[in-house]
Image (tube, helix red, strand yellow):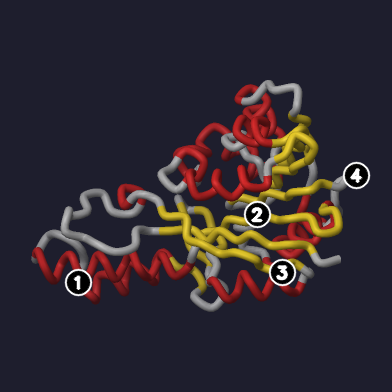
Amino acid sequence: MDREDWDSLARRYEADLLEIACEEGASALEEEIAALGDPERRIADFGCGPGSLLPFLAKCFGEVIAVDYARDLLEAARVRCRSRKVVFECHDLSRGTGLETTVDVACCVNALIDPDAEKRAGMVRALVGSLKKKGVAVVVVPALESVFHVYHTLVQIREREGKPAGLSPREADEMMRAEVSSFADGIVRVGGVLTKYWMREELVALLADHRLRVTRMRRVEYGWKEEIEHVPRWVQGARPWDWLVVAEHGK
């Protein structure tokens, strides 16, 4: 997506793209960030969007750099967080150029979602180029496995409750083909926007290619209401999720 596309998202960001900091899974992300927090440390929020994480980051770190490509989103972030600890930077991460200053921690939450693989790789290069030696990256991405889990659950609901609940296997196949633009590349339509979803092993391999060693990986679950309007109470097991990775830079 280009700058105009991202700017157009500014007013509808919370409705069209999941703001993880406002969801049930926020505690998992906050746990990881708090564990790294230190008033002597500097953190960068790459792809900060409208700034949902910034107030929390400002509590945990001595300095916060809020980075985004879309000026309208940055302006929304300024309004949302007026802490003097936070500085704002309009930066095209997809070009692969790091920040002028290095940081101890790089946070990248649901920002590696561009359908263009080269742009995503550029963002990772920019993130790595901004990290100090032994710096830590906290990365959250949409999970492709979760998409299949949701459709499987919808089929289970139909099998147990009959029509009109859930989906038949044929209906699920048809809907999934319409939603998933590319199974091979993990490109999914979200609110009409082509969005990159990640498999666990795929994400680990990409980070390793950029000298980021994964030290911890966990699911960040969110509520069924984001995927299924009326989920039955008997539905058990994992809820839909994003992948959360903590990785150390091994320069």
Q: Is 71 situated left or right of 221 in this image?
A: right
Which residue in the structure is indicated by mark 2?
A: 138
Which residue in the structure is indicated by mark 4?
A: 100
Give me the C-alpha separation between circle 1 and circle 3: 42 Å
Which residue in the structure is indicated by mark 1?
A: 168
Instruction: Tell which residue pokes out farthest to the right in this image.
Output: 100
Q: Is residue 115 visible?
A: yes
Considering only order in the chain, which callout, 3 or 1, is on the residue closer to the N terminus? 1
Q: Is 135 situated left or right of 45 in this image?
A: right
Instruction: Say few, some or many: other residues with alpha carbon within 10 Å of mark 2 (under 14 / 14 to 19 / 20 or more).
Output: many
Q: Is residue 213 above or below residue 22?
A: below
Q: Is 79 situated left or right of 66 in this image?
A: left
Instruction: Say few, some or many: other residues with alpha carbon within 10 Å of mark 4 (under 14 / 14 to 19 / 20 or more).
Output: few
Give me the C-alpha separation between circle 2 and circle 3: 11 Å
Give me the C-alpha separation between circle 1 and circle 2: 38 Å
* SS at mark 2 in the image: strand
Corner quadrant of residue 11? top right
Give me the C-alpha separation between circle 4 and circle 3: 23 Å
Foreground disc of the pair 2, 4: 2
Q: Residue at x 64, y 57 (%)?
A: 112
